Image: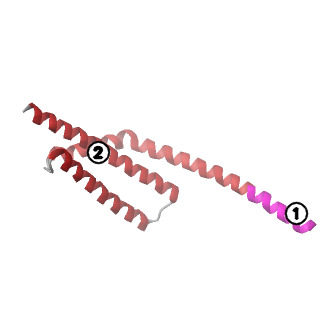
Amino acid sequence: MNEIINNEWHVFLVCVVYGYLIVFIYDLIRIIRIITGSNRNIIFAEDVCFGIFAGFKAFGIIQNNNSGILRGFIFFSYGIGMILYITIFSKALVSTAKSVIISIKSFINQHIKAKFKRRKADIEYMEKNG
């Protein structure tokens, strides 16, 4: 009996960690969207592919850790992992990544604009003084 309970605790903890990881992976996708600026159709396709991936991984974990038996506590543990990640880390990670990305983009844009202005001035000077 004790062995069965230990196995269920193991499955519970694995599913909590997986729920946590799946939302983390989705946050990485959100960060990539900030960088690339995807349109609605691409976001929809990404979300569908991610949902299929997450579903197959979830049922793969159930198959490997619980012989494919679906139990309520497994879905509950996925939810706990997701909620823990969202409430503790998600907002901070995405907002920090967004700030860093915006800073990097503005830094790059400023340097590129300055370089083009210098090039334009050089070209105009060459055209005038031939």
Q: Is residue 82 visible?
A: no
Q: Which residue is outermost to the left?
A: 1
Label 1 sits on residue: 125
The amino acid marked with disc number 2 is Tyr
User: In the image, which is nearer the foreground, mark 1 or mark 2?
Assistant: 2
Indicate the quadrant containing the N terminus: top left, top right, bottom left or bottom right.
Answer: top left
**Disc 1 to disc 2, C-alpha distance:** 62 Å
Whole-percent x, y for residue 50 in the image: 34, 58
Residue in the picture at 27% in, 52% down: 57
45 in relation to 65, above or below: below
The amino acid marked with disc number 1 is Tyr
Q: Give the mark nearest the N terminus, 1 or 2.
A: 2
Secondary structure character of the magenta stretch overall: helix
Indicate the quadrant containing the C terminus: top left, top right, bottom left or bottom right.
Answer: bottom right
Question: Dot 1, how many residues are within 10 Å of its Cα: few (below 14), some (14-19), or many (20+)?
Answer: few
Nearest to the observer: residue 8 or residue 48 = 8
Label 2 sits on residue: 18
- The segment highlighted magenta reads 115-130
Residue in the picture at 39% in, 40% down: 89
125 in relation to 102, above or below: below
Task: Give the quadrant of residue 92.
Answer: top left
